Image (cartoon, helix red, strand yellow):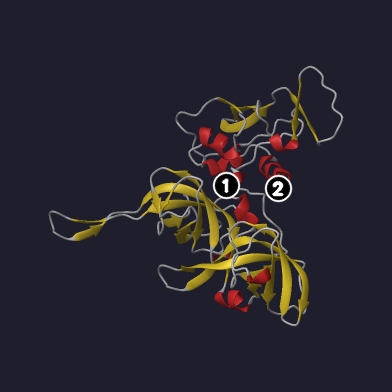
Amino acid sequence: MMKSFLRLVGCCLIGVAIQASAVELKPDHPDVYPVKQGDTLWDISSAFLKDPWLWPELWHVNPQIENPHLIYPGDLIKLVYIDGQPALTVERGPRTITYKKGDAIKLTPQVRVQELDSVIPAIPLQHIQSFLVNNRVLTEDEINKSPYILAGDEQHIVMGLDDYMFGRGDWSEPHQAYGIYRKGPAYVDPQTKEVLGFAALDLGMARFENAEKDVARFKITASREDIRPGDRLIPTEERKVDSVFYPKSPEGEVSGQILHVFSGVRNVSQYDVVVLNLGDRDGISIGDVLAVFGKGETVRDRVTKELVKLPDQRRGILMVFRTFEKVSYGLILRAEAPLKVLDVVKNPN
């Protein structure tokens, strides 16, 4: 997955410095930033810019650098000025050779040998990897029409890894592998009350063995929780998994709310994954950066005795990394104050 991510860095860093009048440098920005192990492009951008998602507008490719789109720990990111405009450029640390495991390596002075996975990513992928593949949002009809677990082998009611079980459904065109899901909470739009979908809670994987009429035998090949009769069997998705992200401003005006946080608590903090009431139909796309606004409280005007709602206050930033028809998943990249379910999300500027 990380190797696929390198395409992002290439896309984002190719080009020349452009006019950056709309890009605001932080007052305390460094002139030089040494890239450290564990850094992301978001971290580096946050050191220089008030709005980190605008970093591609400041990037200047140094023609003397081979593969300038790959950034490694030990490299130096420098702030320079070209025609009076700020730009970022990279100065290599000791020359880097990338290799695959098993390759024969000859070490020479001033050569730093690292695996390709040492290239820094744009965002901290470890927080979203499980959400890229396993979690799904389905309609109630899709859930109700899917095959379900009838019983475990020897009538077991709790099953796990390597257990056999029986499912009931239509096996006229069986798939080799099925995801095991449990119907989770409904995602309901807070304003319109429309049901936007249901969380399909990922429990594990099962391999189809054989079938007789509408009953099929399966072997559980992966288990993340206890599996029980009534849980659903849904064919694994055949889709491109997006592991390449380019943080950007939305193309149009966006306004929505946080519906759910996967950490299991109501309060939301940095690197939490949240569900938004915005999806493909709303024009939201992968990589969109949104500002999170805490809802302003209602207070009583002590002079007029009226109730007055205070303005919403910007408290954080998130990036959309997976979309469905009516909802999407976002990663909180910055939380300047406590965030909550039902907080508003809007264009960042």
Q: Position of residue 132 (x, y in %)?
A: 63, 55
With 265 as the anchor, is 299 left or right in this view? Answer: left
Instruction: Tell me the amino acid under the disc marked 1.
Output: His
> Extreme front residue here?
154
Q: Nearer the viewer, residue 76 or 337?
A: 337
Q: Position of residue 230 (x, y in %)?
A: 59, 73
Residue 127: give its label.
Answer: 1
Name which residue lies at 38% across and 44% down.
337
Residue 1: give its label.
Answer: 2
Question: 216 above or below 44?
Answer: below
With 216 as the anchor, is 227 left or right in this view? Answer: left
Q: Position of residue 344 (x, y in %)?
A: 41, 57
Question: 265 above or below 151?
Answer: above
Residue 343: give its label.
Answer: none
Instruction: Tell me the amino acid under the disc marked 2.
Output: Met
Q: Is residue 273 visible?
A: yes
Name which residue lies at 59% across and 52% down.
287
Q: Is residue 70 visible?
A: no
How many labels, in total?
2
Between the residue at mark 1 and the residue at mark 2, the CA separation in whole angstroms equals: 13 Å
> Extreme top residue here?
109
Task: Check disc 2 and report its element: helix, strand or loop.
Answer: loop
